Amino acid sequence: MSNHSNLSDNAKTLVIVVHPNLESSRINKRLATELEQRGNVTVHRLYETYPDEKIDVAHEQALLLAHDRIVFQFPLHWYSSPSLLKKWLDEVFELGFAHGRGGDKLRGKELLVAISSGGAASMFQAGGLHNYSYSELLRPFQQTANYTGMTYRRPFVVSGIREVTDEQLEKYAVEYAEYVEGY
Ligand SMILES: Cc1cc2nc3c(=O)[nH]c(=O)nc-3n(C[C@H](O)[C@H](O)[C@H](O)COP(=O)(O)O)c2cc1C
């Protein structure tokens, strides 16, 4: 897991926001608008792009090819991502693109997972209510990065969302944008 980006300063970043109801979101909506206001990254809202969940695989692969750093941003749903991201992975990271013969298209890119979680951080450890750390729960993403030759960056986590004040959320938004932009 890498804390620092090895990519150059002008690396192109694609942020895939996966929230089934972004309109009623507080955390993910704010994080996404901060990125958009800064204008340095491509923000791609998956549920809004595909309300019928029919994914245009060629379009998604072209987006991936055009960017160096890929961010998956989502609210934690049952210890994982909302289901559309799983469908997206199953279809877009296909044989010959992400793995297998000729499947080297993601090699050298970065993968950064950014999550919000209702539970407090202290619950995500052995003996806590949720027993496992965020790092443990996110292992399928980490190993997907490993297997496809991507560098897995330290995840960005906003936890205990009900205790996050508006002021703290503003700080998270700035911290997130700077991390995503590679600082
Ligand atoms: C279907 C569903 C499953 C959820 N599962 C979890 C979970 O496993 N762990 C957790 O900490 N929060 C869980 N939550 C809470 C969400 O993570 C929380 O509402 C979200 O991060 C808030 O972000 P938002 O303001 O962008 O909507 C779940 C929420 C929903 C609707």
Image (cartoon, rainbow, N blue to C red):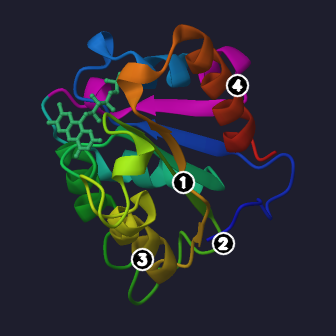
Circle 4 SS class: helix
Sooner in the amino-acid sequence: mark 2 or mark 3:
2
Q: Which residues are magenta?
A: 34-51
- Residue 143 disc label: 3
| Image quadrant where residue 39 sits | top right
The answer to which of marks 4 and 1 sits earlier in the sequence is 1
Q: Is residue 35 above or below residue 159?
A: above
Left or right of 82, for residue 106:
right
Q: Amino acid at mark 4?
A: Val
Report the amino acid beneath label 1: Pro
Q: Which mark is residue 108?
A: 2
Residue 117's place in the image compared with 102, above or below, is: above
Task: Indicate which disc, 1 or 2, sits on the residue closer to the N terminus.
Answer: 2
Disc 1 marks which residue? 155
Q: Secondary structure at mark 3?
A: helix
Farthest residue, direction front: 127
CA distance separating discs 2 and 3:
15 Å
Marks 4/1: CA–CA distance:
16 Å
First reached walking from the N terminus: tag 3 or tag 1: 3
Please give the residue where the numbered disc 4 appears in the rendered image: 174
Report whether the residue tagged 1 is closer than 8 Å to ligand 1.
no
